[in-house]
Image: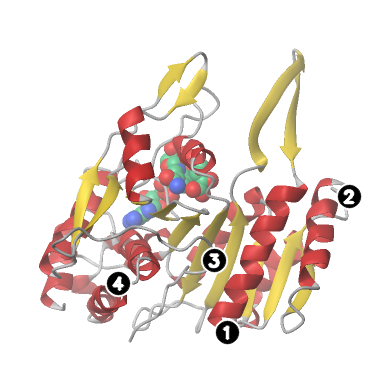
Amino acid sequence: MSRQYSAKVAGQYLGKPNSDGRYEVTLIKGDGIGTEISDAVVKIYKAANVPIDWEPVDVTPSLINGVTTIPKPAVDSINKNMIALKGPLATPIGKGHQSMNLTLRRTFGLFANVRPCKSIVGYKTPYENVDTVLIRENTEGEYSGIEHIIVPGVVQSIKLITKKASERVIRYAFEHAKSTGRHEVKVVHKASIMKLSDGLFVQCAKEIAKDYPEIKVTFELIDNTSLRLASDPTTYSKVVMVMPNLYGDILSDLSSGLIGGLGLTPSGNMGEKVSIFEAVHGSAPDIAGKGLANPTALLLSSCMMLRHMGLNKYADNIESAVLKTIASGPENRTGDLRGTASTSSFTEAIISNL
Ligand SMILES: NC(=O)C1=CN([C@@H]2O[C@H](COP(=O)(O)OP(=O)(O)OC[C@H]3O[C@@H](n4cnc5c(N)ncnc54)[C@H](O)[C@@H]3O)[C@@H](O)[C@H]2O)C=CC1
Ligand SMILES: O=C(O)CCC(=O)C(=O)O
């Protein structure tokens, strides 16, 4: 029943267990539904006897010299453990501090955001056998945060694309394809319009592809990819998609919609030394505090994390229990999956299926 959500290709996990064979993992519970879904993960890990001790940290942002900054104890904990599980962090719209999600990715050089999306057996949607893998450049592009007011009523936002960041995420995508048996890397872009920025991304891919003659490389305009994903996602089943930041953000939400929504899709932010695993979704303020949140996406992200740490048997056990629970019927599913379960009754059902 294992779905093998794995992201083990970039920097290897260098953490070591203590003398009792246990690992320390930094836990950022997050905002909105973050506490509810993180508590579900902690409870399930305890029941599954996963040899992990959580180190919870606070990432409330502070502005130091006008720069959004992560509290030092959180930075120290992540640097020490080299691995973290993160709930969603809310970002104010059109004002306020910069995104802490992006700040974490930049601070720890988490250059590749791996977002797999696979149909859940037993939960029917109009799309069957979805099995996509999308890798999003995670440190620059449209999310560089370089914006100016030129004159009132005219603003400029700079999309920064560098050879260095493009090359490392594209190489990661080829390595990922190689290690997971996917035979094609599809570079998603809009170089017809952004001839220089996306053009550089495409050019880097053409160069790197020469090092991987066994992997086919193809190129597709982002608008075409959106159409084809919504028409027949199975054509992407043997493919690893790689793309600049914003495209990856949008296409991964679109992909979630194909299999039942944001409550289901995991991700891993991969760096050379540190990696942080989190759901694709945000803090869901519309359902926060109501016991309605689906913890599946964070749980599957944690399974990616366990496999990155080499703790595969625990990942398999938890993942199987989650999928079995969802397949067992609407009374054991949360409302986003047209079910009647609360976060806590869903969590108990998973525990009984471990
Ligand atoms: N990586 C992160 O931490 C991310 C954070 N955000 C932040 O989250 C906040 C809210 O953003 P939204 O646009 O509302 O997106 P969202 O992903 O929080 O919610 C979109 C819709 O999906 C539902 N949903 C999401 N996760 C769910 C879950 N686990 N179970 C059941 N339903 C779920 C929500 O109820 C809502 O209807 C914003 O402040 C945004 O900046 C958004 C995306 C990613
Ligand atoms: O911080 C945010 O709100 C954006 C995060 C984001 O782009 C994502 O995780 O998909």
Residue tagged 1: 181
Q: Which mark is residue 195?
A: 2
Q: Is residue 87 visible?
A: yes
Q: CA distance from mark 4 to mark 3?
A: 27 Å
N-term mark: 3 or 1: 1
Classify 10 Å Cα crowding around label 4: few (below 14), some (14-19), many (20 and above).
some
- Tell me the kind of residue under disc 4: Leu
| Residue 267 relative to residue 224: left or right | left
- Tell me the kind of residue under disc 1: Gly
N-term mark: 4 or 3: 3
Mark nearest the camera among 3 and 1 is 1
Q: Position of residue 66 (x, y in %)?
A: 52, 15
Q: Position of residue 150 (x, y in %)?
A: 78, 16
Mark nearest the camera among 3 and 2 is 2
**In terms of secondary structure, where does tag 3 sit?**
helix
Q: Position of residue 207 (x, y in %)?
A: 82, 65
Q: CA distance from mark 3 to mark 1?
A: 21 Å
